[in-house]
Amino acid sequence: MKESQITGVLTPIFAQFGLELEAVEIIPAGKRRLLRVVVDGDGPEGTGPLLDDIAEASTAASDALDRADVTGAAPYTLEVTSRGVNRPLELPRHWRRNIGRLVAVQLGEGDTITGRIVSSTEDGARLDLNGETYEVRFVDVDRAQVQVELNRPKAARSEDEEG
């Protein structure tokens, strides 16, 4: 089972569903293997793919892998997942899809700042740090990760949640 062959088979399949292939991981699990595929996409509101989109794409991906015979003879389990909050923000589209979310940013000079993404371009993002605006250029970022918030600000909640 080779990641490059699997990527070649899956990339066009996910593209049909408006999804981008982010990563392919092959993890030994006894006599089986876990084939973990990470996808991302804009979704209907530009903030990432919906669970239904991933489920449909997962079925199509499984069928394509079976037809292409790139997984070898050993049994495997296919897991298709979204990026989630545990993966770092590495590309401008990751930042764009997380506008409104809290992010911790480790800068090249060693400082770490935490703020809410207000806007994003191809070169950088604007963060709100407790009412202060901070411009961060992506070339200055060593690592950035979305922070889990149990109580989102009211502006980020839907009307159903406020009910």
Image: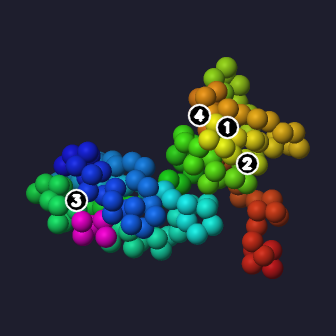
Q: Amino acid at mark 1?
A: Gly
* Label 1: which secondary element: strand
- Circle 2: is it few (<14), some (14-19), or many (20+) Cα within 10 Å? some
Q: Amino acid at mark 2?
A: Ser
Instruction: Say whether disc 1 or disc 3 marks the residue closer to the N-terminus.
Output: 3
In x, y percent, where is residue 94? Answer: 57, 48
In x, y percent, where is residue 49? Answer: 52, 64
Instruction: Say whether disc 2 or disc 4 marks the residue closer to the N-terminus.
Output: 2
Point out the frontmost of discs 2 and 3. 2
**Magenta includes 62?**
yes
Q: Amino acid at mark 4?
A: Arg
**Marks 1/4: CA distance?**
13 Å
**Marks 2/3: CA distance?**
41 Å
* Label 4: which secondary element: strand
Residue 13 visible, this angle: yes
Please tell me which residue is depicted at 78% across the width and 76% down the height of the picture: 159
Query: What residue sits right under mark 4 in the picture?
Result: 143
In x, y percent, where is residue 27? Answer: 29, 48
Point out the frontmost of discs 1 and 4. 1
Query: What residue sits right under mark 2 in the picture?
Result: 119
Instruction: Say whether disc 1 or disc 2 marks the residue closer to the N-terminus.
Output: 2
Query: What residue sits right under mark 1 in the picture?
Result: 124
Q: Main secondary structure of the magenta part?
A: helix
Question: Left or right: 146 with respect to 161?
Answer: left
Region in magenta: 60-64
Vertical side of 160 occupied by 67: above or below:
above
Q: Amino acid at mark 3?
A: Tyr
Instruction: Say which of 44 and 79 sits in front.
Output: 44
Query: What residue sits right under mark 3 in the picture?
Result: 76
